[in-house]
């Protein structure tokens, strides 16, 4: 459950004479998560979103939930973040992030995908990471792999082909009567061909 900071709520309720909230204060988004999870700065490690520096909560509260005739307390940790900050959340003892959030300028916390988190952390590498995802979908690597084909196939050496629904991802390095050797097209090659 996401909540706004107390300061933001007071700012939102403050109104000028004409009924418009005063723009003099900027709201800080607050991420509220279960206390047994940890919030960390999002970083890229080998083009994958990973846990960075651990963030310290600014407040801890308890949320009371009634289950039948029993009432249970769920501790919550509050993290105040600067707008534009990308945060990942992981279990307390885990090293792999489960969710990613971005702090909006309007005081809202928005859950985002790991792909979008990586693009916000490193906008210059967006094309390269998208190309790598296409290549991973084919299962190809930069080392040529042999594929069996029917005699009379149309594959030729040094020509780029599509594979498994992905266009322009496979480079044929060698073609024989019954076999072809294919490898992944690198990002630099895709850029020079104009397909990435």
Image (spheres, rainbow, N blue to C red):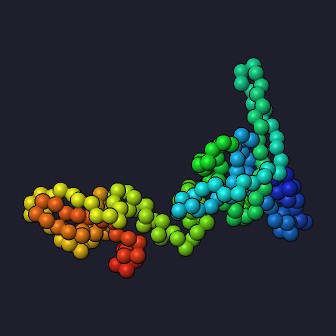
The vertical placement of 80 against 190, above or below, is above
Relative depth, front residue between 194 and 26? 194
Give the residue drawn at x 35%, y 65%: 142
Quadrant that contains the C terminus:
bottom left
Left or right of 30 in this view: 160: left
Q: Residue at horizontal 65%, vertical 49%? A: 89
* Residue depicted at 28% across the width and 64% down the height: 144
**Figure quadrant of residue 107:** bottom right
User: From this viewpoint, which residue is outermost toward the right?
Assistant: 17
Residue 128 appears at what percent x and percent y? 47, 69
Q: Quadrant of residue 54 in the image?
A: bottom right
Q: Farthest front residue?
A: 143
Q: Position of residue 4 (x, y in %)?
A: 78, 52
Q: Is residue 30 visible?
A: no
Residue 123 in percent (x, y) is at 57, 71
* Image quadrant in which the N terminus is located: top right
Please give the name of the residue rendered at 15% of the width and 58% of the height, measured from the top-left corner.
149
Is residue 95 visible to us here?
yes
Quick check: 194 above or below 185?
A: below
> In front: 121, or 23?
121
In the drawing, does residue 111 fall left or right of residue 167? right
**Residue 65 placement (x, y as % from top left):** 75, 30
């Amino acid at each position: 459950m996401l909540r706004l900071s107390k300061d933001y709520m007071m700012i939102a309720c403050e109104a000028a004479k004409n009924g418009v909230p005063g723009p003099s204060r900027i709201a800080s988004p607050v991420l509220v998560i279960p206390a047994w999870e940890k919030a960390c700065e999002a970083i890229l490690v080998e083009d994958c979103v990973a846990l960075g520096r651990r963030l310290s909560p600014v407040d801890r509260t308890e949320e009371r939930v009634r289950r039948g005739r029993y009432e249970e307390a769920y501790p919550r940790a509050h993290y105040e973040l600067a707008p534009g900050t990308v945060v990942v959340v992981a279990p307390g003892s885990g090293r792999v992030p489960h969710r990613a959030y971005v702090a909006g300028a309007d005081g809202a916390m928005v859950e985002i995908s790991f792909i979008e988190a990586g693009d916000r952390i490193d906008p210059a590498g967006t094309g390269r990471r998208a190309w790598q995802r296409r290549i991973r979908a084919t299962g190809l690597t930069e080392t040529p792999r042999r594929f069996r084909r029917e005699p009379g196939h149309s594959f030729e050496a040094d020509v780029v082909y599509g594979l498994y629904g992905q266009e322009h991802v496979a480079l044929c390095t060698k073609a024989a009567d019954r076999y072809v050797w294919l490898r992944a097209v690198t990002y630099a090659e895709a850029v020079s061909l104009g397909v990435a």
